[in-house]
Amino acid sequence: MMEVNFDASGDYVENINFVDNASEEQIALLQNQIQEQQKQLSDLEQQQMEKELDDYYAQLEEDRQKEEEAQAKAEADAEAQAEADRKAEEERLAEEEQKKQEEEEAQAKSDEEEAEAEAFLEDEAQTESESEQEEDTEALEEEEPAEQTVSQEQAIQLVRDQQGISEDSPLLVAYDHVDDSGNYIIHVYENVVDNEETGEEHTATQGWYQVSPSDGAITDVTVDGY
């Protein structure tokens, strides 16, 4: 006889014990039973395998969807942060540009006001100098009109000739005033530019000369100062 058994997990266990008097018909019947049981067991295993595969693929799909959602969220967050950073940078640059423009406008206004003030002071000084020269000329003409044989222009030329100052020299020779004795005071100087952009300059005196209006005698009075 042949025994057919299954273990605790349902796996087939075959234990065949043959007896001497078993017929071929009995053996064939037992073999058929074994084949049917094996077939049933195979179908159950196939169903179990298919279920496990379905569960596995379902879990893979769920994991894939979660990963795609997480990736999409991360990309959206990164894009939003990049946009926020870009806007913040644009605002910062705009503020810097506005501040720079305001500073330039303020500096331009300050330079303009300073230039106007300097021009005003120069005009006043020029007007005052011209007025003083006119007063000195008038006073000289009133005091000693008969003794003047040398004019202001001649006095200037006399100083030029004595000092060797040509017309194209950077040194300037100009009438300044008449002293208490009625002599012309001739100023020899040079204009020195301090700032080429604004044109600001100052006068550098080279000498003072006294010229007699009667005979054109020249005396260096630089040490006396005027």
Image (tube, rainbow, N blue to C red):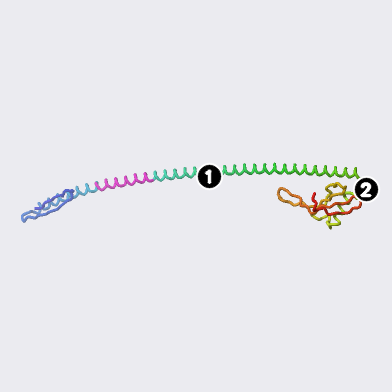
Q: CA distance from mark 1 to mark 2?
A: 84 Å
- Badge 2 marks a residue whose secondary structure is loop
Query: Which residue is identified by label 2?
Result: 147
Residue 65 counted in the magenta span: yes
Measured from the top left, where is residue 129 in percent x and y?
81, 44
Q: Main secondary structure of the magenta part?
A: helix
Determine the residue positioned at 91% across, 52% down.
Answer: 215
Residue 89: which disc? Answer: 1
Residue 36 visible in rendering: no
- Give the mark, 1 or 2, whose residue is nearer the N terminus: 1
Furthest residue toward left: 21
Q: Residue furthest bottom?
A: 164
For residue 113, side relative to residue 125 (left or right): left
> Which one is closest to the eye, mark 1 or mark 2?
2
Q: Amino acid at mark 2?
A: Glu
In x, y percent, where is residue 44? 22, 47
Task: Name the foreground residue: 74 vs 190.
Answer: 190
Q: Is residue 189 above or below residue 106?
A: below
Disc 1: CA contacts within 10 A as few (<14), some (14-19) or many (>=20): few
Q: Nearer the viewer, residue 175 or 7?
A: 175
Q: Which residues are magenta?
A: 48-67
Query: Residue 10, position in %: x, y?
Result: 18, 48
Give the residue drawn at x 78%, y 52%: 205
Residue 131, magenta (yes or no):
no
**Residue at x 80% of width, y 51% of height:** 224
Q: Describe residue 87's horizontal placement relative to residue 162 as left or right.
A: left
